[in-house]
Amino acid sequence: MIFSLAPMEGLTGYIVRNAFHHNFDFIDKYYTPFIPAAKRMNSKIKRDLDPSNNEGITLIPQAMSILADEVISLHEQLKPYGYDEININLGCPSGTVVSKKRGSGILAYPDMLFSFLDDLFKNAAFPVSIKTRTGFDDNILWPEIIDIYKNFPIKDLIIHPRVRKDLYKGSIRLDDFALAIEKLSDSPIHLVYNGDITDTESFNNIINHFPSVDEIMIGRGLFMNPALIAEIKKTQYSENLLGSEDFNTRLIKWHDEILEGYLGIFSGSKDAMFRMKEIWMYMHGLFPDHEKLWKKIKKCQTLSDYNSIVSSAFISLG
């Protein structure tokens, strides 16, 4: 089973990728947060892509675009960094993105989707993978969208079985993923499952439903529990990936590496704490009295207060 970390804006930059790689090194592939392909890469994106900031990491840049020439232009900018494959974001549900028919916005316009992919695959001399949802307001067009994808040599088709309207709420649409498996059974397109893998039970549920799946992308679940992949592999394959170093020690090192990295790139500690609070929004569930802890972390205004609250939280883990 291959595991990848889903691209999450503001969360899965190189500092976090390195913290996973150094402390919970169970992730096979990483994807960058989406890069606006319509613009030249700025210094922040270049820093995130710099190979020296991603040593030992398999990283795939993700493009936000619905124009083939923009994606091809981005690929030219990426080549000096040693990147070849590009992943196309056709899943982002953000209002500012879909209003421009980008991300999952294009899924409401099958003719436009076909035209974009046709132009791209006719002119792109590099591997292209796609991360998609299964529709916009509903999944009525999903069978047609699958048929469009089937026309092209997509390297990996990563499916988050929700429509844009679902955002990240409600149940995942297992029937939509099942339909993709059925309709693409005679296609060389490699399917990857993404969505609501947060513990071993949810992983087992997906594998039981779809035993042919050999690659899983996880996003929020790995911030809720950075050792999730290790736990999955221990229950599924009897692999003890954590070794002699216990989870608490790894978690503290993971946290401290991220905080130190943020303090190094931001001009003030408040920006670093803001980013750490984004992580704690998912991670606080690991701790005793986690709702009380989360309220304290949300309210803290100084780095010294933050460090005091977090130190006590880690002690509470034992």
Image (cartoon, rainbow, N blue to C red):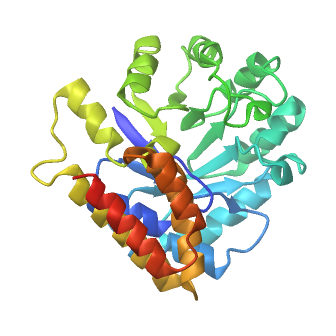
| Residue sitting at x 83%, y 41% | 105
> Foreground: 84 or 3?
3
> Foreground: 31 or 300?
300
Quadrant for residue 108, please give it: top right
| Residue sitting at x 71%, y 27% | 134
**Which quadrant is home to the N terminus?**
top left
Q: Position of residue 109 (x, y in %)?
A: 89, 33
**Up-down: is 203 above or below 25?**
above
Q: Position of residue 259 (x, y in %)?
A: 43, 73
> Foreground: 265 or 26?
265
Tell me if residue 90 can be seen: yes
Say left or right for 64 vs 278.
Answer: right
**Up-down: is 62 above or below 288?**
below
| Residue sitting at x 64%, y 26% | 161
Quick one: which residue is furthest to the left in this view? 244
| Residue sitting at x 72%, y 45% | 92
Quadrant for residue 110, please give it: top right
Image mark count: 0
> Foreground: 103 or 315?
315
Q: Position of residue 235 (x, y in %)?
A: 23, 26
Tell me if residue 12 can be seen: no
Q: Position of residue 273 (x, y in %)?
A: 54, 72
**Up-down: is 213 above or below 55?**
above
Say left or right for 204 vs 89.
Answer: left
